[in-house]
Image: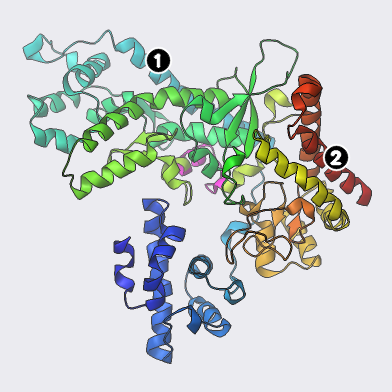
Amino acid sequence: MEHVFSKVKDVPLIWEYRQRIWEHLFSMSDGTTKSRIPKLKVVADFFRNLRDHHHIDILSIADLDLAITTSFLQYVEKQKQNSSKTDFYRNLLRAIGIPSELVPLNPFPRQRVSDPVLYNDQQTRAAVKTLKRECEVVMKRVKTLQSMLSTGKDPRREHGGKKGDWKRPENGVFIATQVVGVSLISWDDMNASNDIPGFRSIMHGLNECPGAPYLSHDGSVSIENGWTGQIRWFHPFADDIAPFVVLTMIRTGVNFSAIAKVKSGKANWSEPYPFTVGGSPADQYVFMLFEKVRGTPSDDDNEGPNIRVVSSTRPYSHPYRVFDFVEQLTAPLRAEMRNELARLKAINDRSEKEQQRLLKLERIKDDLFIYRTKSTGFGSLADHADISSPLAIKKCLLRCKLETNIRHLRSLKINFAYTESSNNLFVSQLLAHHRTASTSLFYIRRRATLERHYQLFQNIFALSISLINSDKFTHEALRVTLEAQGFIGETLDNLMNPEFRTRWGNSCATPYNPPAGFSQGTEPGEMCRVQNCIDGCPSARWIYDAVSIVEKQHATLCARREKIGLISIQGSSLPSQIERCETLLNAWRSVA
């Protein structure tokens, strides 16, 4: 933390509240910290400018007023990335506890609300075809490795090797497993340790040995000789797992952040699907589980996964089989991570480099999408979840002839196996399947709240009808409709921003400033905690296909009720979930 704030000691407001700023804005990952340090400098320079050129000393929160806080907008108006700098500034003010009425709105246009790219069926199918081919390269590589593990021999001349033996890939695998060892120790460290006799000679021989096949930037299959090529047989690199991630995003509609944070272990990313889909008893389905952090309340820890997506367990390119394979692909690397973790923990007097390595291993060892790197040794997609997507993902999108803005993947809706049943793979969990009695009671109490707020509830949905019933959605038409309903500036941008979708499927105009009556338990400047949007919050708007999603959810819950019987649902939240779905649907119909 100190290295982040060491250059702002002369700015009392930042220095005094550095712990809170760190916890709210910098404590997520190394990448996040690195990307936000320049923005912290901009804010610090703003307060220095007030002091040095306007003789205004800001020593504490008490010294701030609306004129001062909004003057930041003029300060950054002509700077590049003024919108993202203002977002950071607003978040910093919230972090240190500035009253919400003193936090200025962001008037600068955001790139993230640009017109979405809408892909047609041909583009979609071409992208999926490319991704399946790229996945097959990696899957075939794993099978090839299994066949070579027992066929290789020592190619070194002093161990009976003959001319040409170094050029046989199975012999490179033998060297990697039986002589050098496949660990997380870097080439430089192995060379410096002198623990491997003839290390330089072995590495020279491996320069002739074909390594694992991989996808180059243009999509062609390449082979890299040398030690890195051998490592790739055992440990995937980021570009090896990228097609699996992008394919999952297209199949499910789940965003990159939620997928990147998935933990290893089937129990962490799947659970049984209780219904029969299709006529064949051989068809098996599961719920794929994801955690959507943005737009959900911070005290939602006991709710369980808030996104569930139905997946077949049969096709290799469907989410369940994709994750199952990635478990297999990353298992050797995960095992080496645990070995390295044990080694580092055994060191009593660790260097700073060793301590940082240990902390990173502790943080990512249970992530599903881990990978090997040439520089740092290992990494995880989870470290990129809250910042920009990694280069490997962007290159994969380009090979598929898709935009590198991963938000545009939301427009890809693949139906494949579920078309006939009208149940595509874009199934988000609007109404969570709760397991605990306390959660069930929470939703039973919500029934009374719905009754009290029913008129307000109807009015809000009446305003949403013009958005919901639009058969041909366009970005501009939606914007015009929302402006006509009184949303302008930041509130309009928030409604257009998919990051501010709540757990009920609606968009929120004021996620950091919930209206009176809907802000219980939310501290000033925090994202709305309770999210009682269905009670008629005036900041809520249901758009796109919200009606159809609730209709499907209602049908699913009714089918579950018929399947498990009356005795099994006593004391559960299932009846109240069904009633809430019916309340939503009746409200829409009554004002349509």
The scheme the figure's colours follow is rainbow
Instruction: Give how far across and how far down residue 1 sits, in percent.
Output: 33, 60
Residue 107 in sight: no
C-alpha separation, residue under disc 2 versus residue under disc 1: 50 Å
Report which residue position mark 2 lands on.
582
Residue 533 to residue 183: above or below: below
Instruction: Give how far across and how far down residue 543 sits, in percent.
Output: 76, 50
Quarter holding residue 227: top left
User: Which amino acid is tagged 1?
Assistant: Lys
Q: How many marks?
A: 2
Q: Name the residue nearer the viewer: 445 or 323.
A: 445
Instruction: Give how far across and how far down residue 254 sits, in percent.
Output: 60, 39
- Residue 104 among magenta residues: no
User: Relative to 136, is 44 on the left or the right?
Assistant: left
Report which residue position mark 1 lands on.
143
Residues shaded magenta: 394-406
Whether tag 2 and tag 1 are in contact, CB under 8 A, the answer is: no
